[in-house]
Structure formats: C-alpha cells, structure tokens
Image (spheres, rainbow, N blue to C red):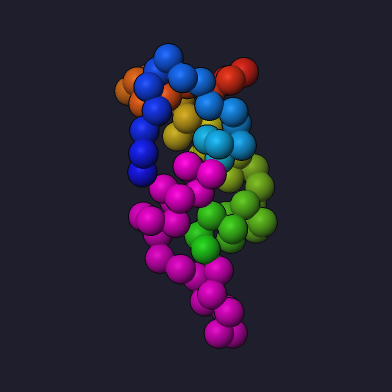
Amino acid sequence: METETSTTPLAEWQAKEMFDEWLDNIEPMVTVFGIKLSPSTVLREADPIAYRTTFHDWVDRCQRDGWFTVEGH
C-alpha cells in the first residue's frame, strides 16, 4: 500500500479504496456456492455499520500514525 504524507489530505473515497485494499489483503476471499467475494465487499454489504466503524477506526489510526489525513475527518 502506498502511503501519502500528512500534508496531502485524501478524499474519503480514496481512503475507502485504501481501506478496502488493506482489508482484502489481510482477510481471505469469501466463497459462497462457488462465487468468490472480497472481504471488503462482504463486510460493506452484510454489515454496513461494522464496515463504517472499522473504516473510521482504521482512518483514525492511520492519521494518528501520520500516514495521511482525510478531508473532513
């Protein structure tokens, strides 16, 4: 995952793309009746509240560690 500097704020959609990539790299693909789904898609669609909560926790940690900032966050 490429990191941005703390002086370059990201749009929320960019941070979500990075979050999805991170999540998809740490969790295995989900297979249902032979259909493979990414972990980020499963979490976002099956439990949108958990997805948003986990995303915001991840953004807070990334901002605290100085990886990037997110506009409006």
Q: Is residue 33 visible?
A: yes
Residue at 64% across, 43% down: 49
Q: Nearer the viewer, residue 2 or 69?
A: 2
Q: Give the range drawn in magenta.
A: 17-37
34 sits left or right of 61 in the view: right
Residue at 50% across, 49% down: 20
Residue at 37% across, 22% down: 5
Res 45 quadrant in image:
bottom right
Q: Is residue 51 magenta?
A: no
Q: Which residue occupies the extreme bottom position in the image?
A: 34
Q: In this view, does 25 lie above or below 16?
A: below
Res 34 quadrant in image:
bottom right
Coordinates of residue 29 in the picture (x, y in percent): 46, 68
27 sits left or right of 41 in the view: left
Q: In which quarter of the image is the N terminus?
A: top left
Q: In which quarter of the image is the C terminus?
A: top right
Q: Is residue 63 visible?
A: no
Q: Does the magenta stretch include residue 26?
A: yes
66 sits left or right of 46 in the view: left
Coordinates of residue 62 in the picture (x, y in percent): 39, 28
Q: Is residue 10 above or below residue 16?
A: above
Residue at 59% across, 28% down: 11
Coordinates of residue 65 in the picture (x, y in percent): 33, 23
47 sits left or right of 28 in the view: right
